[in-house]
Image (spheres, rainbow, N blue to C red):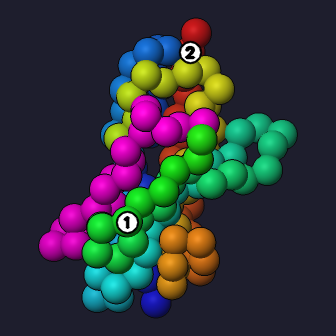
C-alpha cells in the first residue's frame, strides 16, 4: 500500500507560482508511476501531469504544457508539481496519484486547494 499526502497549495495571484509536494509512505513509491490531477468546482477530475517510476518519462495535459513541471525524488519519497504562470482557470483541488503506469492510477491523496486570483 502507498499513502499519499499533498501540501503546498494556497492562494496566489495570476502570473505567480506555486510548488506542490506529495509525500508518499512505503517502499513501493520507488517502483510506481506518479501523477497529478485536479478538480475545479462543478467539473470532473482531469489529468494534469504524470511521471514514470524512474523519472525518465513525463507527460502533461495540453493546458499546462510549458507552465507546469512534474518531478520526483525517490530518495525522499516525494513527487513535486512546479506551477508557473498560473491562471485563474488553474484554480482547483489538486490530487496526487500513484499507480502501475503513467496512465493507470490506484492510489490517491486527499487533495490540496490551489486558488489563483485575477
Segment tinted magenta in the rendering: 63-81
Residue 19 location in percent, x, y?
A: 34, 40
Q: Is residue 76 above or below residue 28?
A: above
Residue 39 in the image: x percent, y percent?
69, 46
In the rendered structure, are the residues bearing label 1 and label 2 in contact, judged by CB atoms less than 8 Å apart?
no
Rendered view: 30 above or below 5 = below
**For residue 66: magenta?**
yes
**Mark 1 = which residue?**
57
Q: Quadrant of residue 52?
A: bottom left
Sequence-wise first label, 1 or 2 = 1
Q: Is residue 71 left or right of residue 64?
A: left
The quadrant holding residue 53 is bottom left
Residue for point 48% across, 57% down: 59
Q: Is residue 118 left or right of residue 10?
A: right
**Left or right: 4 in relation to 91:** left
Q: Residues within 10 Å of mark 1 (few under 14, many from 20)?
A: few
- The answer to which of 51 and 80 lies nearer the viewer is 51
In the image, residue 110 sits, relative to residue 66, either above or below, namely below
- What is the number of callouts on the image? 2
Q: Position of residue 31 (x, y in %)?
A: 34, 85
Q: How far, Cα to Cα, is label 1 from label 2?
A: 32 Å
Asked whether 38 falls inside the magenta stretch, the response is no
The C terminus, quarter of image:
top right
Closer to the camera, 111 or 90?
90
Q: Is residue 20 above or below residue 71?
A: above
Q: Residue at x 49, y 15 (%)?
A: 14
**Residue at the extreme left:** 75
Q: Which residue is mark 2?
A: 117
Residue at the right extreme of this rendering: 42
Q: Nearer the viewer, mark 1 or mark 2?
A: 1
Q: Is residue 24 visible?
A: yes
Amino acid at each position: 500500500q502507498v499513502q499519499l499526502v499533498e501540501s503546498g497549495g494556497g492562494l496566489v495571484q495570476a502570473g505567480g507560482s506555486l510548488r506542490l509536494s506529495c509525500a508518499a509512505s512505503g517502499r513501493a513509491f520507488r517502483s510506481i508511476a506518479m501523477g497529478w490531477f485536479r478538480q475545479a468546482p462543478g467539473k470532473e477530475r482531469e489529468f494534469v501531469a504524470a511521471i514514470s517510476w524512474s523519472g525518465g518519462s513525463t507527460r502533461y495535459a495540453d493546458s499546462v504544457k510549458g507552465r507546469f513541471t512534474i518531478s520526483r525524488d525517490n530518495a525522499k519519497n516525494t513527487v513535486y508539481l512546479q506551477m508557473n504562470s498560473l491562471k485563474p482557470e488553474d484554480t482547483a483541488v489538486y490530487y496526487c496519484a500513484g499507480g502501475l503506469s503513467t496512465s493507470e492510477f490506484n492510489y490517491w491523496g486527499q487533495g490540496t486547494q490551489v486558488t489563483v486570483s485575477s
